[in-house]
């Protein structure tokens, strides 16, 4: 992709400088340290000869790559697609810094839960979509599905958010009796039930809630176990999937109700292997 001012493609050293600086700013953002993006653009423009606006666009390209990887990105720099292959290849070179972004050292507190925004689920893409091979390689290396599945701290924090959210919703409609009976099933009984939270609607009907949490955006893929999928099929009317996303920055959520196939594309990625006939 060319810079409009210079009319030349970005060099590897220029892209490396932008990526390294972007990661510096992400670390500051996650540590709640202040910075002024306009000053950063100006400094990088002086070092590269690019315009400040082209630096900002490059940063938005980096946001787009991180979004594909299921990671959070700099606030105010929404993902801008159509990035060059060199950018994806450069980010792979910063594996240690990417891995640092994958971790969540402490769960989010519940003090801001009253402001948790539960929105409509993202629309399922129509038609066949594909991503370039170099992005597939990048996503496979930093697999967001496997990362979130293995992160017990993240998963439990999301479940706690869902638990408290359900209680507050029932208290809000003065069903205090039901709120007292909301149960964190996966915490009490383990993961074998096929859902995480037992809750109720306003009429007292049971809701079986499976919680999936990510530090990525609302379209980050997630893992569904065979047990969870089978349970969702048996309890289609009462099963809910509660998706918590943007966990590190500002947790939001959406809920899926009804057959999962209506909302997401399900693909088999693991196989059970045994030696029996």
Image (cartoon, grey):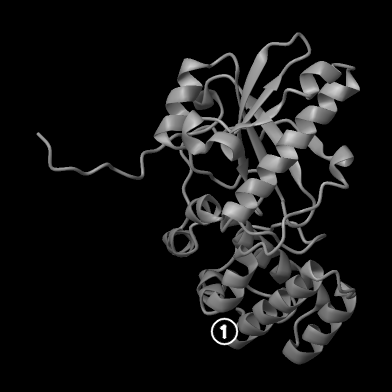
Question: Residue 72: x percent and y percent?
Answer: 69, 59
Q: Is there any visible trace of residue 256 in the rendered image?
A: yes
The residue that disc 1 covers is: 12
Decide which of 103, 139 is in the foreground and name it: 103
Q: Is residue 271 above or below residue 153?
A: above
Q: Is residue 174 above or below residue 158?
A: above
Q: Secondary structure at mark 1?
A: helix
Pick out the residue farthest to the front: 188
Question: Residue 47: x percent and y percent?
Answer: 76, 91
Q: Which corner quadrant of the image does residue 42 belong to?
A: bottom right
Question: Residue 174: x percent and y percent?
Answer: 90, 17
Pick out the residue farthest to the left: 277
Pick out the residue farthest to the top: 203
Q: Quadrant of the C terminus?
A: top left
- Left/right of residue 117 with respect to residue 149 in the rendered view: right
Q: Residue at x 22, y 44 (%)?
A: 273
């Amino acid at each position: 992709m060319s810079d409009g001012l210079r009319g030349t493609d970005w060099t590897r050293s220029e892209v490396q400088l932008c990526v390294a600086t972007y990661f510096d700013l992400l670390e500051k953002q996650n540590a709640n340290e202040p910075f002024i993006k306009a000053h950063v653009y100006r400094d990088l423009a002086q070092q590269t000869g690019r315009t400040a606006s082209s630096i900002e666009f490059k940063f938005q390209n980096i946001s787009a790559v991180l979004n594909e990887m299921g990671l959070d990105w700099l606030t105010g720099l929404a993902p801008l697609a159509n990035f060059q292959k060199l950018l994806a290849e450069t980010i792979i070179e910063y594996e240690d810094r990417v891995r640092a972004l994958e971790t969540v050292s402490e769960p989010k507190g519940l003090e801001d839960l009253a402001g948790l925004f539960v929105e409509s689920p993202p629309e399922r893409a129509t038609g066949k979509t594909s991503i370039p091979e170099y992005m597939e390689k990048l996503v496979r290396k930093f697999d967001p599905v496997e990362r979130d599945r293995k992160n017990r701290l993240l998963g439990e924090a999301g479940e706690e958010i869902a638990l408290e959210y359900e209680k507050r919703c029932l208290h809000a409609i003065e069903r205090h009796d039901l709120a007292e009976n909301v149960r964190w099933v996966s915490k009490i009984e383990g993961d074998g039930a096929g859902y995480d939270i037992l809750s109720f609607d306003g009429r007292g009907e049971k809701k079986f809630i499976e919680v999936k949490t990510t530090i990525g955006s609302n379209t980050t893929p997630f893992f569904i176990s065979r047990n969870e999928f089978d349970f969702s099929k048996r309890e289609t009317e009462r099963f809910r999937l509660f998706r918590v996303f943007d966990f590190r920055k500002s947790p939001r959520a959406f809920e899926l109700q009804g057959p999962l196939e209506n909302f997401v594309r399900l693909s088999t990625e693991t196989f059970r292997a045994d030696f029996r006939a």
